[in-house]
Amino acid sequence: MSAPLPQLGPPPRLSVVIPAKNEAGSIVEQLDELERVLAPLAPFEVVYVIDGSTDDTSAVLARAARPWLRVVRHAESCGKSAALLTGIRAARAEIVSTLDGDGQNDPAYVIPLVEALERGGPAVGLAVGQRLRRGDGGFKKFQSRIANRVRQAILADDTRDTACGHKVIRRQVFLELPFFDALHRFLPALVKREGYGVVHVDVIDRPRTAGTSHYGFFDRLWSGLLDLFGVWWLLRRRRRVPRIVETRP
């Protein structure tokens, strides 16, 4: 896993972390959109994490260099959660927005998510995008609907849609979470486990215009069930979050 990049001057107001595996066809349009949409939040940075890509992702990012763009790379694919951890470790802002690399997450929702997090103050650790309409096919939407209902019934995380890539989180909160593969699918429950609040913003996803999905039905089904019960166990092993008060001797 790549080491965090060196400090590059004053920290930005916002870091956007984008895990990308074989998403060369989406990168330039996504960067152009981010440059336009995030102007009100300047200074910002975008950290692309190339997760073992075998296409032209690295070359496209090299040609698309921007002053606010940083790139880290996994020599081999380690999965989305590992890519998020790498990117958030490298991020320099206290607030981090995450987006998928396929272009389906509309960057226009980054600012509403950041505002929702900031309105909640330090007690709120995560703002979650919840999709009203999705650009995926009918079967994939059916899969997601069933998975979300089962997850809500077991974890009671009060979140309709945890698979949406649109999230804004406090960097230190993310780094406090127990890490495991597929962590990104359970962020609301895990953030609440640490004693922080979670807020929600409705978003609308777009259809994928390039590349192909990296997930299949059966590979997610069995691993997803194991992960779900692992998180259920974690939630029940945290009896109470300590409220720490420093006192003079």
Image: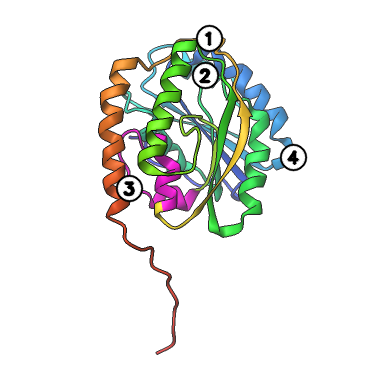
Q: Which residue is mark 2?
A: 102
Quadrant containing the C terminus is bottom left
- Residue 193 relative to residue 68: left or right: left
Q: Residues within 10 Å of mark 3 (few under 14, many from 20)?
A: few
Q: Residue at x 67, y 46 (%)?
A: 115
Whether tag 1 and tag 2 are in contact, CB under 8 A, the answer is yes
Give the amino acid type for the residue marked by disc 3 in the picture: Pro
Mark 1 and mark 4: Cα distance apart in space: 28 Å
Q: Mark 1 vs mark 4: which is more N-terminal?
A: 4
Q: Residues within 10 Å of mark 2 (few under 14, many from 20)?
A: many
State whether residue 241 appears in this view.
Answer: yes
Region rendered in magenta: 171-192
Q: Which residue is mark 1?
A: 210
> Relative to residue 32, is residue 56 depicted above or below?
above
Give the amino acid type for the residue marked by disc 4 in the picture: Pro
Q: Which residue is mark 4?
A: 40
Mark 3 and mark 4: Cα distance apart in space: 33 Å
Q: Quadrant of residue 246?
A: bottom left
Q: Which residue is mark 3?
A: 178
Give the amino acid type for the residue marked by disc 2 in the picture: Asp
